[in-house]
Amino acid sequence: MLHLHLSQEGPALFSSLRLVGHVALICSMQDRMPSSPPPGVECCWLKIASAMANAHKFKKCNMARGCLCCLKYMMFLFNLIFWLCGCGLLGVGIWLSVSQGNFATFSPSFPSLSAANLVIAIGTVIMVTGFLGCLGAIKENKCLLLSFFIVLLIILLAELILVILFFVYMDKVSESAKKDLKEGMKLYNSENNIGLKNAWNIIQAEMKCCGVNDYTDWYPVLGENIVPDRCCMENSQDCGRNSTESLWKTGCYEKVMSWFDDNKHVLGSIGMCILIMQILGMAFSMTLFQQIHRTGKKYDA
């Protein structure tokens, strides 16, 4: 029994004896060594350790600097394109306002809500947002980056609220739009509204429609049995007088709604792209803001 017990515990006992032997050997070597290394040796080891630590920090700093520079210039390029698009829209809006007056002011309830003014407003917002993003990224300015983030967040929330309200009150919006469009038709031949007249003519010719609901919507505006010539299937001088056979029978409101329905997938894809661009812009700006705030200094490209 004793022999069996020793055979089972033999390996563990042998390992313990080896450990004791190593400890004794180390202690004897320490007794022979001087209490402290020579000053030159200690200084050399300290320099080596410091150099290794600095090299590790330099490597990490270079990696962080490279990532931040890449992020900075990506954000700058993205916002530069954004800013150029805003400049283009602003130019188109100003040209429409100067050459066409209140172009496409369909609703008399909102006379300032013309296509020209709408394009000018959108172009201005895009220009300001792009400028904040460009300058904040290239200068690594925390205030500008935070302003860019807040502006994008406000725009995103406004878009979501408008979309939700539109779908909740879709029927009321539809009826109100039809009513305002009919009221706006009364300005068709009025002075200083050449833009409105051109807009109606373009829509009726391109959409192959007439009036809001049908061609009879023009009778109270232009007179009995008179519609604009662009309501004719074959456009010619005075073709809209006393003729109903050659007119487009479908109203323009129905045609426009059908166009939106047919292109809802394309419009949805465009909306998703805009949403993704806004979210990426917010993410990039906040990442750059946090890195600058964490380091407390600029990363020089």
Image (cartoon, rainbow, N blue to C red):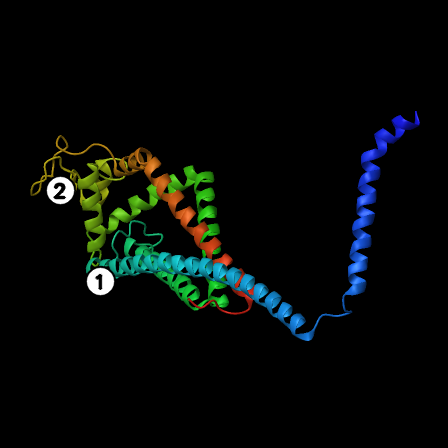
Amino acid carrying label 2: it is Asp
Instruction: Nearest to the eye among marks 2 and 1: give it.
Output: 1
* CA separation in Å, label 2 and label 1: 26 Å
In the rendered image, the vertical position of residue 262 relative to residue 154, given as above or below: above
Crowdedness near tag 1: few (<14), some (14–19) or many (≥20) residues, C-alpha within 10 Å: few
Q: Where does residue 211 sit, x and y in percent of width and height?
A: 24, 39
Q: Pick whichever, 77 or 248, lies toward us.
A: 77
Q: Is residue 44 left or right of residue 131?
A: right
Residue placed most toward the observer, 240 or 299: 299
Above or below residue 237? Residue 111 is below
Q: Nearer the viewer, residue 201 or 71?
A: 71
How crowded pointer 2 is (Cα within 10 Å; few <14, some 14-19, many 20+) is rated as many
In percent of the image, x 30 and y 60: which residue is there? 84
Res 135 → quadrant:
bottom left
Q: Residue at x 38, y 45 (%)?
A: 273
Q: Secondary structure at mark 2?
A: helix
From where the camera sits, is residue 230 visible?
A: yes
Where is residue 252? Give x, y as percent.
25, 38
Q: In the structure shown, which secondary structural element does the residue marked by tag 1 occupy?
A: helix
Amino acid bearing label 1? Val
Question: Outermost residue, bottom direction?
Answer: 39
Q: Earlier in the sequence, mark 2 or mark 1?
A: 1
| Label 1 sits on residue | 98
Number of residue marks:
2
**Observer-nearest residue: 166 or 36?**
36
Above/below status of 263 relative to 290: above
- Residue 36 lies in what quarter of the image? bottom right
Q: Which residue is mark 2?
A: 229
Give x and y (percent) for residue 16: 83, 43
